[in-house]
Amino acid sequence: MARTMFDKIWAEHRIADLGGGLTLLNVDRHLIHDLVAGPAFDRLAARGLPVRNPERTFATPDHGVTSQPDRPARLDKVATKLLDDMRHHSRKAGVQLFDIGQDGQGIVHVVGPELGLTLPGSLIVCGDSHSCTHGGLGALSFGIGTTEVVHVLATQTIRQRKPKAMRITYTGEPGRAVTAKDIILFTIAKLGTKAGTGHAVEYAGPAIAALDIEERLTLCNLSIELGSKIGMIAPDDRSFAYLAGKAFAPKGALFDAAVAHWRTLTTDEGARFHIEHHIDIGEITPQVSWGTSPEDVIAIDGHVPDPDIETDPARRQRMIEALDYMGLTAGQPLAGVPIDRVFIGSCANGRLSDLRAAARIAARGTVAANVQAWVVPGSRRVQQAAEAEGLDRIFRDAGFEWREPGCSLCLSTANEQLLPGERSVSTTNRNFVGRQGLGARTHLASPATAAASALAGTICDVRALEGRA
């Protein structure tokens, strides 16, 4: 019987059917960060339970740590407590910790792939909803809650209901300045934030096969914004080349054997999906969000939609509220709207290729006087590689702040946030009300678009900046 990639990996990890639609699954890798580590370990200790397989759990601080230089001296009391708890419990349990300043520290969804902790066909969980990122390498990965984190620590298993399967097939050639971020934002706008609910999404087609690995990770990162916990791309020769030599990937004959198995994980011809969608990426231009949901997205040279022509009353009301919050009016162009902040980073777009794309634009000018612009590498390795290439100098010379690895302005922790009413162009994945600070207005975009906007002082079509609109 023909099977999907998702079905194959699910079956390989199934331990038992628990009844009531629940399946007990074996967990290969468990990633934990500073917001969940201490509380989860405390709950485990309160029950007198040890960590079942400490060698399969990996910890790093990312959510609560400041991105300011000279850390940890600049950590506040909350972040210090979280970090101290993570250190204490990791050391006691024998869990490997990639601490501040150490090789391997960074956002969990950036360091997992770059260290080779993320492998095709593996089942990965983390107490963070953007764990779907790891599906870009063909892993079955999803976010879990704190109670489930405790369960994984104690048993190295997870109980789950098997979702249905969805496939989105992409064809065509990308237009100028179109990135993976634009592709997934367009997809969410087209299908809606509930389209993937209850489904594991496979992204497929020749346009996906043409993406490099870091672009695939960006695409899968926003699967949760499509409503799906799981987003996956079949592993291929690009995946295997990316993983070869990674610290935690198999070596030598074991790697060859692993690749032979990984090649079997692709969806069989004739396999059936519950839902199929098809998208021609030739239709896509650089995208930017206008509202307070990841589906509130239009082409950057487009106009803010009019709620009056929306036929769904609930959707119309939400659009009205979003426009009021964002300080926009129906019909106005987004390009040219003045901004206050630019943020380049996050688990969506904090990788080396993202910084390279932004630096190419930053080299064309200087940050506008009315804009404060930050670049926050996704990991220590990304930071070091960027500095070795001189990207930090390009950003600094252009007036950007070059900061330390972490989540930072993505979720406005560690006292890093926008002021009420400030408008931001951000490479992050969420633009919810207050996401980057109380009353903050966030426009999601690609790294190139964000960098161009920083120079222009307004939301800017990068194609126009390059004289190729």
Image (cartoon, rainbow, N blue to C red):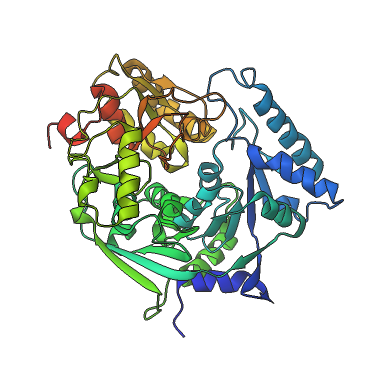
- Residue 413's quadrant in the figure? top right
Name the residue rendered at 43%, 34% in the picture. 345
Label tally:
0
35 or 462, which is in the foreground?
35
**Residue extending furthest toward the right:** 48
Q: Position of residue 141 (x, y in %)?
A: 54, 57
Name the residue rendered at 46%, 68% in the picture. 263
**Residue extending furthest toward the top:** 369
- The quarter of the picture where the C terminus appears is top left
Instruction: Report whether residue 372 is seen.
Output: yes
Q: Position of residue 269 (x, y in %)?
A: 37, 79
- Residue 370's quadrant in the figure? top left
Instruction: Report whether residue 180 is seen.
Output: no
**Residue extending furthest toward the left:** 468
Name the residue rendered at 44%, 49% in the picture. 221
130 or 134, which is in the foreground?
130
Q: Position of residue 39 (x, y in %)?
A: 73, 41
Q: Position of residue 300 (x, y in %)?
A: 22, 39
Name the residue rendered at 36%, 34% in the picture. 325
Q: Is residue 68 rendered to the left or right of residue 192?
A: right
* Above or below for 225 versus 13: above
